[in-house]
Amino acid sequence: MKTTIADKVIFYNRNLEYYGKLPDGFKVLNPFIENPETMKVMETFYHKYYNDNNRRKFIIGINPSRHGAGVTGVPFTDTKRLESVCGIKMSSAKTHEVSSVFLYDMIKEFGGAESFFGQFYINSPFPLAITRKSKDGTWLNANYYDDKKLFEMVKDFMIESLEEHIKIGVDCSEVFVLGTKNAEYIKKINREARLFGEIVALEHPRYIQQYKSKEKQFFIEKYILTLSGEK
């Protein structure tokens, strides 16, 4: 039986672990190890939408949030959208993630989950959630580029991760990077590793949802035009 993209992604996630060092005050969350149900719902998602070998365009995030893929194992997907849009219920957790709201609103206007995921593969250069300890002792979401030392420590792992995503079977001639600062770092990595052709930056869903909510429809249309090659 031929190996599908779903099989490749599931194999990758089953073996995903970060063994590198981190600066003091940072930690990595691996939902595939910490919650057995994450593995189950992730496998269901990829079997539903990626059980083929069709070539897809690559959308590159930053790193998962602890309320999105940090719980569900599916990029930019909280438990609400996992159930309401994808029809996959997660019993052990209930999460709401800001980026997931925008992305799935855009997916709806794009033509729905089946159409969108049939054309695009989303993942992150650092595919696990990163948290940072605040002054009051609470743990907050962190981005791989928030701290120079953090980026230097995870960079090689990020390059390896991107190479693994490419092996899954994505189109590397043009990739879409979410977040303008993220795009700067991906371009920096690309100059060193030469992984991609054209890199197209889009505003990050969290930024749009939090700071540009009144212009949300404009950004949804921008996403659809850009992803459809009509930018």
Image: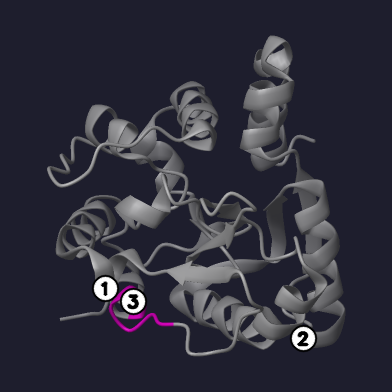
Q: Is residue 215 above or below residue 200?
A: above
Point 39% across, 32% down: residue = 96
Identify residue for label 2: 193
Q: Quadrant of the C terminus?
A: top right
Badge 2: how crowded within 10 Å, few (<14), some, or many (20+)? some
Q: Which mark is residue 8?
A: 3
Q: Is residue 153 above or below residue 151?
A: below
Q: Amino acid at mark 3?
A: Lys
Point 41% across, 53% down: residue = 69
Identify residue for label 1: 33
Mark pair 3, 2: CA separation:
22 Å
Q: Please tell me which of labels 3 and 1 falls first in the chain.
A: 3
In-front residue for pair 27/61: 27
**Element marked by disc 3:** helix
Point 31% across, 51% down: residue = 72
Q: Is residue 126 above or below residue 109?
A: below
Q: Please tell me which of labels 3 and 2 falls first in the chain.
A: 3
Mark pair 3, 1: CA separation:
18 Å
